[in-house]
Image: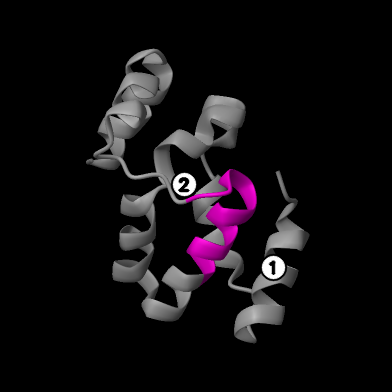
């Protein structure tokens, strides 16, 4: 997992802006879920929520962040993702709160 500063530096290099709000939003659930926080926002729907909040360039920053942390952008519609979610009650609850 990359640090906040690394995520900002990656986006600065690729996109010309650090996008701190994107990284803060993606990792905001760390205190609630620990490393499993990625299951809630580090996915295709998280990217779309960021696109709605801050636009296409911010969505690209989210993709860069997620690829660095997960090596892929998980699809919440995939069976593997749903199985993983069902095994973690605290993540399932956070996911519901996100409105997915």
Q: Which residue is mark 2?
A: 42
Element assignment for label 1: helix
Residue lying at 77% horizontally and 61% vertically, measured from the top left: 5
Residue 52 at what x, y percent from top left? 29, 69
70 falls in the magenta region: yes
Boundaries of the magenta span: 61-72
Q: Quadrant of the N terminus?
A: top right
The number of numbered discs placed on residues in the rendered structure image is 2
Residue 92 at what x, y percent from top left? 33, 23
Residue 36 at what x, y percent from top left? 53, 28
Looking at the picture, tell me which residue is in the foreground, 44 or 8: 44
Residue lying at 52% horizontally and 34% vertically, measured from the top left: 37
Tell me which secondary structure the magenta stretch mostly adopts: helix
Residue lying at 31% horizontally and 51% vertically, measured from the top left: 45
Q: Is residue 47 above or below residue 97?
A: below
Name the quadrant containing residue 75.
Answer: top left
Q: Is residue 92 above or below residue 39?
A: above
Is 32 displayed left or right of 69 in the figure? Answer: left
Q: CA distance from mark 1 to mark 2?
A: 16 Å
Marks 1 and 2, the one that precedes in the sequence: 1
54 falls in the magenta region: no
Q: Which residue is mark 1?
A: 8
Q: Nearer the viewer, mark 1 or mark 2?
A: 2
Looking at the picture, tell me which residue is in the foreground, 30 or 42: 42
């Amino acid at each position: 997992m990359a640090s906040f500063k690394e995520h900002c530096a990656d986006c600065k290099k690729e996109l010309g802006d650090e996008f701190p709000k994107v990284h803060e939003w993606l990792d905001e659930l760390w205190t609630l879920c620990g490393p499993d926080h990625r299951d809630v926002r580090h996915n295709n729907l998280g990217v779309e929520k960021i696109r709605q909040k801050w636009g296409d360039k911010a969505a690209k920053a989210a993709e860069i962040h997620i690829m660095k942390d997960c090596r892929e952008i998980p699809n919440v519609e995939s069976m593997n993702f749903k199985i993983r979610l069902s095994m973690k009650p605290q993540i399932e609850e956070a996911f519901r709160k996100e409105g997915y």
